[in-house]
Amino acid sequence: LIFLIAEVLCVLTVLSLSAIITNGDMAGGGSYYMISRSLGPEFGGAIGILFYVAYAFGASFYFIGFAEGVALLAPVQQFICEGDTETGCISVDNFNRIVGFVALAICFGTAWGGAEAFTKVNVPLFVIQYL
């Protein structure tokens, strides 16, 4: 039942997005630009705020998931301990915070550098994911 509801929602979203897209020529700016030009500034502003909040929460969850994935790697597990931190190892929570912060700093630097920096970073990351 849950999958059926999710499928119906996805189909309705795709159909409504297709209806908005066929409303006119889209110059650029992605989904926010398209929605704000098609539905007006009131709906566009409200949806823009929702997009911002959704992307902010999504990015935080992505960084947490990335940090937990790194913590599962065998070479890294020797530095992580579950209980006693007196032996010089890092707790799992602190390790996730450190890795998440480093990943966030790298993403911030790439975004600050603009499209050219993203292009330079994107190709090596594309190669690394298939190794």
Image (spheres, grey):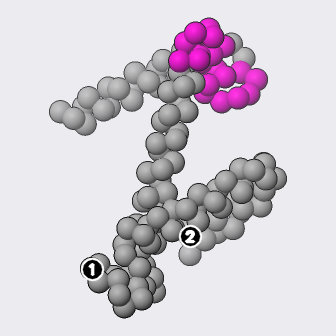
Q: Is residue 113 above or below residue 98?
A: above
What is the three-letter code of the residue carrying label 2? Answer: Tyr
Q: Residue at x 25, y 36 (%)?
A: 3
Residue at 58% over, 65% down: 102
**Seen in the image, is 90 located left or right of residue 123?**
left
Name the quadrant containing residue 86. Answer: bottom left
Looking at the rendering, in which quadrant would you find the C terminus? Answer: bottom right
Nearer-the-camera pick, 75 or 119: 75
Residue under circle 2? 130
Magenta stretch encompasses residue 41: yes
Span colored in magenta: 26-46
Asked whether residue 122 is drawn in magenta, I would say no
State the residue position of label 1: 83
Residue 13 vs residue 33, the one in the foreground: 33
Q: In this rendering, would 8 be left or right of 48?
A: left
The answer to whether residue 35 is visible is yes
Q: Secondary structure at mark 1?
A: loop
Secondary structure mostly seen in magenta is helix
Tell me which numbered mark, 1 or 2, is placed earlier along the sequence: 1
| Relative vertical location of residue 71 with respect to residue 85 in this rendering, above or below | above
Hey, what amino acid is under mark 1? Answer: Gly
Q: Are marks 1 and 2 in contact (CB under 8 Å)?
A: no
Residue 52 occupies quadrant? top right
Farthest residue toward the bottom?
A: 87
Mark 1 to mark 2 CA distance (whole Å): 35 Å
